[in-house]
Amino acid sequence: MRKVLVVDDNPDQLELMVLALRAMYAITGCVSLSTFEQALECDRPDAILLDLHVGAHHAADFRELLDRRGVQVPVVLISGAVDLHEQAKALGCVEALEKPYPLTALREVLGRVLGPEART
């Protein structure tokens, strides 16, 4: 089963994403930069769903951590920000998902990012 790291400081949003995806992927949820760093130490994800702002941190802080560790996995940026797609491009994200979104859109994005074999 493919591994997805979900990063959001809103516990309700995080739980919703975990519940929506856990039948198809091995999901690890993170609520902060420190829990994100701990999750990376334990396992390497196949993809990351990353909120634009997590606590006092910006997605750029998470990207910097990935770069320092040499972790190269597809990142999907999630936010309600007006300039979401521009920010996603600047951060090197493979996709951007605008809040609010239907859960089907979340599944479709991960399907595109991880490919058709992702569910096996």
Image: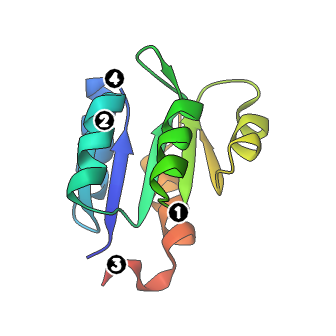
Residue position marked by numbered label 1 in the rendering: 72
- CA gap, disc 2 and disc 1: 23 Å
Q: Position of residue 107 (x, y in %)?
A: 45, 60
Residue 94 in sight in this render:
yes
- CA gap, disc 1 and disc 3: 21 Å
Q: For the residue marked with disc 3, what is the amino acid?
A: Arg
Q: Is residue 78 left or right of residue 93?
A: left
- CA gap, disc 4 and disc 3: 26 Å
Q: Is residue 80 left or right of residue 37?
A: right
Quadrant placement of the N terminus: bottom left
Q: Position of residue 75 (x, y in %)?
A: 54, 53
Quarter assignment of residue 47: bottom left
Quarter assignment of residue 27: bottom left
Q: Residue at x 42, y 86 (%)?
A: 117
- CA gap, disc 4 and disc 1: 25 Å
Q: Residue at x 38, y 38 (%)?
A: 7
**Label located before the other in sequence (2 or 1):** 2
Tally of numbered discs = 4
Residue 99 in sight in this render:
no
Q: For the residue marked with disc 1, what is the amino acid?
A: Gln
Mark closer to the observer (1, 3): 1
Q: Which mark is residue 14?
A: 2
Residue position marked by numbered label 4 in the rendering: 10
Q: For the residue marked with disc 2, what is the amino acid?
A: Leu
Residue position marked by numbered label 3 in the rendering: 119
Mark closer to the observer (4, 1): 1
